[in-house]
Image (tube, helix red, strand yellow):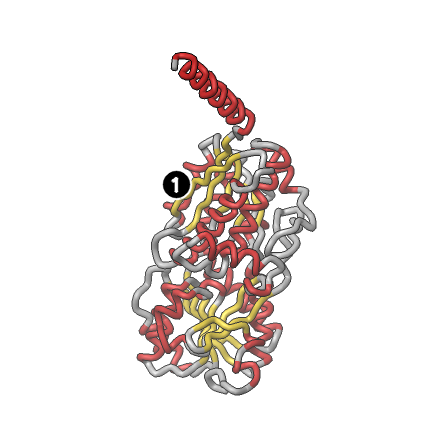
Amino acid sequence: MGILRKSTVSVIALAMAVSIGAGVANAKDKVKVAFIGPLTGGVSAVGVGGRNSAELAVQLRNADPSAKYEYELVTQDSECKPNVGVQAATKVASDKSIIGLVGHYCSAVAMGAVDIYHKFNLPMSVWGAVLPDVTYGNDYKEIHRVNGTMINQNDVAAKFMTDQGYKTWVVLYDTTDYGKGHNKYFTEYLAKNGGEILADFGVSSDQQDFTAELTKAKQLNPDVIFFGGLTPLGVRIRAQMEKLGITAQFQGASGIKSDSFIDGVGELSEGVVSFLEGAPVDKLPGGQYFMEKYKAAGFAESEEAYGPFAFAAMNLILDGIEEVGPNRKKLTKYLGKIQDHDSIVGKISFDDHGQNTVAAITKYVVQDGKWVVWEDSEYATGARKLAGK
C-alpha cells in the first residue's frame, strides 16, 4: 500500500507539473479594448446592437487558438449626450491599459471626443457617427471611421426623392451637429436636383411638442417632410403629423433607421423612407457569417443598422494589435496604412483623414412593419404608393 500511495503521489505530481507547464506555455497576455455607444436613452437599441457586435468580435477572437493575445472588452455608455460621452471618452483614453477603441454612434458625442483621443494618442474607429467633420474636421491620425458619412447619404436621398416626382419639402432638423449637418447637405443636394425647400426648422434634441413647426408646415403644404435627426424625435414628429392631419410623405435620415422607430409609431411607419450607407446585412460580403455568429452567441437584442460596422471596426482594431502588438502609437500607424482590408462590410480603405471609402448607399422603406430595401419592396414595383403618389 505504501508503495502504491507513493506511486500514485508521483503520478499526480507529474500530471500537475505537466499541466502547470502547459498552462504557462499556453498563457496569453491580456489586452484591453473598448467600446463606447449609447447603451441607455432614446437610441439605446442601436447602441446595444453595436456593443453586442463589438463583443462578438472579441469573443470570436478569443476563441481563435492562433490569436496572440486574450482580449478584454471595456464598455462605456455615452447616452448620446456630449457631456456624458466626453466623460466616457476621457475615462477610456486615460486608461493606458486600453489599446484601441470602437466608438460612437452619435455625431455630437464623437465631435466632443476626438480631441481627447488625439491628446491621449488613443487609436479608434468610428462605427456609426456620420458627420463628415468627425474625420475631416481635424488632421488627427488616431481617428478612423469604417462607415460612410452623411455626404453621400444625402446626395442619394435628394436624387432618389426628386426622381419619385416630389418637388417641395419642409425640413425639421435637430440642432446638434448631426442635425445641422443633415440640413446642410440635404439642402445642397436637393437644390442641385431641382427640389425646393419651403421652410426649415431647427428643433432641440429633447423637444416634445412640434405643433408650432408642423402647423406652419401644414400651411405650406409640402410634398415631403424631411427630418434630420434621431429616432426619439422622429417618432414624435411622425405621430404629431398624423394628429394635425399632415399627409405629406415622411422622409428620415439614417438616424431613424432603427426597429425602435417602427415600434414607436406602429402603423404610421408604413411608407416612411430612410437612407443608410453600406449594403443591408444579408447582402454584405460577410453578412451571412456575421448573422450566423450573432445568432449563435445568443444576444437578446437585434444587431440593428450599424452592428456590422461595429463588428468590422472591432475586428480591424484586433487585427492591428495582433500585427503590431499592444502599443497605441504602433496601432495608429497600422490603421493609417489600411488599404483593401477584408471585412464583413467589404474592403476597408482609409483616406488621408482616416475615412473609409463607403460609396454604396441603401434606400429603405417601411413595409408591413419592417425596413425593406427599396428595390425589394412593393413600392418599387408600384404595387404600393408612397404618400402623395
Q: Amino acid at mark 1?
A: Gln
Tell which residue pokes out farthest to the front in this image. 1
Instruction: Give x and y (percent) for residue 247.
Output: 40, 83
Q: In front here: 79 or 184?
A: 79
Q: How many marks on residues?
A: 1
Asked where in the image residue 261 lies, by quadrant, the reply is bottom left
Regarding residue 321, the answer to whether it shows in the image is: no
Q: Residue at x 56, y 66 (%)?
A: 154
Q: Is residue 157 left or right of residue 79?
A: right
Query: 211 above or below 42?
Result: below
- Where disc 1 sits, the SS reads helix
Question: Residue, x 59% and y 68% (percent of image)?
Answer: 155
Residue 5 place in picture, x, y as percent: 40, 16
In the depicted structure, whether residue 175 falls above or below residue 384:
above
The residue drawn where x is 56% and y is 76% is 376
Q: Give coordinates of residue 272: x percent, y percent.
A: 45, 75
- In percent of width and height, residue 215 lies at 34, 78
Pick whichever, 175 or 104, lies toward us: 104
Mark 1 highlights which residue?
Answer: 87
